Image: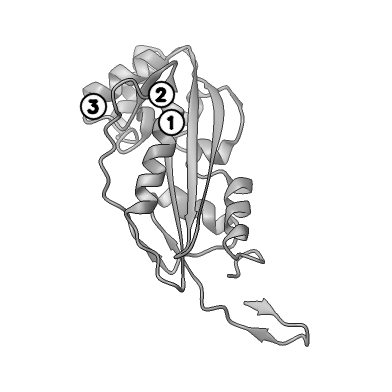
């Protein structure tokens, strides 16, 4: 809703559409008081290109997600992508438990980057921003590794872990944005939504 000069309130015709099937992103939007009118998960090919660097990859995939979802005149669409990078290596969503184990063994005892890019789109414009955080994972014992894999929490998560779940016990240190590591940087997201017409928390 928008407050007019005479103090009256009028409802905006804009609707927020979440272009992601991630429940974590929906939860993070709720922190800002935002509840999407609809959820539309785009279907894009997330295969990295040859020689592609993680940050470029994350921004390209986010842009592709936004491009895959047409915005009606009364809609604001939000898309995002989170990428885990160990040096120049992109660590996407593991295809099975064996790949998840291999990812976690490589991350164990080391620092890595988590990149989240956000795109906000209307029928006329698109705004995009990325946030890079550094994460250190403790050295995992075999018992910790196999115990975590047994939870199944690694499924559908870049780098085979989610900091907001059981794997949070493996992360003693971060530098950057905790919500961005979860999947949506809140200050940057709020700024992009304001640029698209979000004037008050929870109100379009």
Image depth: mark 2 or mark 3 in front: 2
Q: Which mark is residue 46?
A: none
- Secondary structure at badge 2 equals loop
* Circle 1 residues within 10 Å: few <14, some 14–19, many ≥20: some
Say which residue appears at 56% left-offset and 43% top-offset. Answer: 185
**Of callouts 1 and 3, the N-terminal one:** 1
Left or right? Give the position of 112 relative to 96: right
Q: Are marks 2 and 1 in contact (CB under 8 Å)?
A: yes
Say which residue appears at 44% left-offset and 46% top-offset. Answer: 80
Q: Which residue is mark 3?
A: 97
Q: Quadrant of residue 7?
A: bottom right
For this orientation, the residue located farthest to the front is: 124
**Of callouts 2 and 3, the N-terminal one:** 2
Left or right? Give the position of 142 relative to 87: left
Q: Which residue is mark 1?
A: 56
Q: Disc 1 and disc 3: Cα gap in Å?
A: 27 Å
177, 45: nearer the viewer: 45
- Secondary structure at badge 1 equals helix
Q: Quadrant of residue 142?
A: top left
Image x and y of residue 134, in percent: 55, 24
- Secondary structure at badge 3 equals helix
Say which residue appears at 60% left-offset and 35% top-offset. Answer: 177
Q: Are marks 2 and 3 in contact (CB under 8 Å)?
A: no
168, 19: nearer the viewer: 19
Asked whether residue 88 is in view, the answer is yes
Q: Disc 2 and disc 3: Cα gap in Å?
A: 25 Å
* Circle 3 residues within 10 Å: few <14, some 14–19, many ≥20: some
Q: Which residue is mark 2?
A: 53
For this orientation, the residue located farthest to the right is: 6
Height in image: 143 above or below 186?
A: above
Viewport quadrant of the C terminus: bottom right
């Amino acid at each position: 809703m928008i407050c007019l000069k005479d103090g009256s309130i009028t409802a905006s015709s804009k609707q927020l559409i979440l272009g992601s099937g991630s429940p974590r992103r929906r939860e993070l939007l709720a922190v800002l008081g935002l509840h999407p009118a609809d959820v539309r998960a785009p279907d894009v090919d997330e295969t990295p290109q040859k020689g592609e660097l993680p940050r470029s990859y994350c921004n390209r995939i986010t842009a592709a997600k936004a491009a895959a979802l047409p915005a009606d005149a009364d809609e604001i669409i939000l898309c995002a992508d989170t990428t885990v990078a160990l040096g120049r290596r992109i660590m996407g969503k593991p295809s099975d438990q064996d790949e998840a184990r291999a990812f976690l063994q490589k991350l164990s005892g080391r620092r890595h980057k988590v990149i989240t890019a956000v795109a906000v789109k209307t029928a006329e414009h698109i705004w995009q921003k990325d946030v890079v955080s550094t994460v250190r994972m403790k050295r995992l014992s075999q018992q910790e590794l196999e115990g975590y894999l047994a939870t199944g929490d690694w499924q559908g998560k870049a780098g085979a872990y989610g900091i907001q779940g059981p794997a949070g016990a493996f992360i003693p240190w971060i530098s950057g944005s905790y919500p961005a590591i979860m999947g949506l940087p809140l200050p940057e997201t709020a700024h992009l939504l304001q640029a698209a017409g979000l004037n008050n928390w929870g109100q379009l």
